[in-house]
Amino acid sequence: MVAIEDAKTALELSLISPLEETSKVTFRHLAMLAQTKSNDEDVWISLGLADNVSQSMIGRLDRMRTWTQSRHFPDELRITILEEPDVEAVGRLDDENLAILPTLIEALDACEWNTPSIQSTVSNAAKSQDMSPRHAYRALYLCIMGTERGPRLPTILAELDQSTIVNLLRACLEESVEP
C-alpha cells in the first residue's frame, strides 16, 4: 500500500498541471481537433468543455495549433481535408470505388453524424453492395483527403460538417463521370 501511495505521489509531483486536466483529452485527439476545427470554441464544444475550460487546456490547444501548423509536425498525423475534388485522386478511383460512391453518398447524407454511426454506415453501405468496407474507405479517403489511406476517418468526419462532406463526395462523383 505504501509503494502505491509513493508511486501516486511521485506521478502527481512530476506533472506540470493537475492529473485531471492533462488526461481530459489525448494528444492524438487534440491534434485532430486542432486541425479540423478552426474555432477554439468548436474544440471546447466537441470535448464537452464549453462551460469549463481551464487555462492549461487553452494553452495546450494553442501550443498544439502552433505545432500542427509547423513543418515539424509529423506527416502521418497531418490531416488535410479537400475543399473541392482533387482530379488526380478522383482519377485513382477504381471500378469498385466508383460503384460504391453513390450508395455512400446517400447513406452518409441520411446517417446520424457521429463516429459510431458513420463507421456502421460505411460498413453497411459496402455490405449492401457485396463489397469489402476497404473499397468504401478507399473511395472516401481519395475523395475527402486525396490519399489512399490516413488517420481513422469516422472520427475525423464526425468533427466536420456533414453537408460539406456529402457535397464534396457528390462533386467527386460528378468529376469521375466527366469525359
Image (spheres, rainbow, N blue to C red):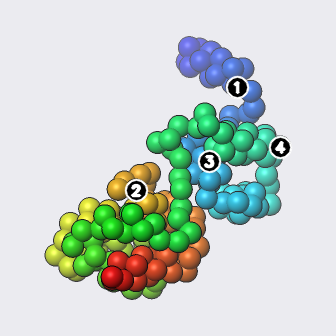
Query: Which mark identifies residue 147?
Result: 2
Disc 4 from disc 1: Cα separation:
15 Å
Query: On the image, which quarter does residue 44 sit in?
Result: bottom right
Pointer 1: what residue? Answer: 15
Seen at 79% across and 52% down, the residue is: 53
Q: Is residue 145 left or right of residue 19?
A: left
Q: Nearer the viewer, mark 4 or mark 1?
A: 4
Say which of marks 3 and 1 sits in front: 3
Q: CA distance from mark 1 to mark 2?
A: 38 Å
Label 4 sits on residue: 55
Indicate which disc, 2 or 3, sits on the residue closer to the N terminus.
3
Q: Which mark is residue 30?
A: 3
- Cα separation, mark 4 vs mark 2, equals 36 Å
Image quarter of the C terminus: bottom left
Q: Residue furthest front?
A: 179
**Where in the figure is residue 72, as x and y percent of width and height?**
60, 33
Residue sitting nearer the eye, 55 or 147: 147
How many angstroms separate mark 2 from mark 3 (CA)?
A: 22 Å
Name which residue type carries label 2: Thr
- Nearer-N-terminus badge (1/2): 1
Q: What kind of residue is marked 3?
A: Leu
Residue appearing at x 78%, y 41% in the figure:
59
Tell which circle, 4 or 2, labels the residue nearer the N-terminal end.
4
